[in-house]
Image (tube, rainbow, N blue to C red):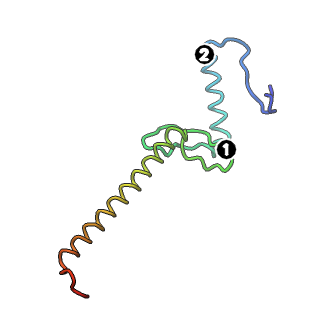
Amino acid sequence: MRGQDGVLVRQLAGTPECAALLAAVARDAVELLTDPAARAALRQCEGDNCPIVYLDTSRGRRRRWCSSEVCGNRERVARHRRRVASRTKGAGARLAASARGAATSPRGAST
């Protein structure tokens, strides 16, 4: 049957039994895995330790995470923390270098 947007959708005729639900899932899995176009859109989430495989239906086919709100947010927070840590580490190194330079050169001496 066609949905309101014209896309073909499946509907169950009544309240399904467990076997009917498993059959529907198995049928959809077989269709997904045997369709070359759909199989090309399968992606594994790039989130750390995330085992989820999803169907990338984004416009540019550049989706990276199963969920932008969960795995994507974790990645953005980790990137921010790395950036802040490298800045503070770099600032600490500059301060230490300037302190070493001030300690080795006498004040008022021209170079």
Disc 1 marks a residue whose amino acid type is Pro
Q: Residue 35: name its quadrant.
A: top right
Residue named by callout 1 = 36
Q: Earlier in the sequence, mark 2 or mark 1?
A: 2
User: In the shown orientation, is residue 110 left or right of residue 20?
Assistant: left
Determine crowd level at label 1: few under 14, some 14-19, many 20+ residues with C-alpha closer than 10 A: few
Residue named by callout 2 = 19
Disc 2 marks a residue whose amino acid type is Ala
Marks 2/1 in contact by CB < 8 Å: the verdict is no
Please name the residue shown 62% across and 12% down the image. Answer: 17
Please name the residue shown 62% across and 19% down the image. Answer: 21
Q: Residue 88: name its quadrant.
A: bottom left
Q: Residue furthest front?
A: 108
Q: Which mark is residue 14?
A: none
Please name the residue shown 62% across and 25% down the image. Answer: 25
Secondary structure beneath dot 2 equals helix
x and y percentages locating residue 11 in the rendered image: 73, 21
Secondary structure beneath dot 1 equals helix
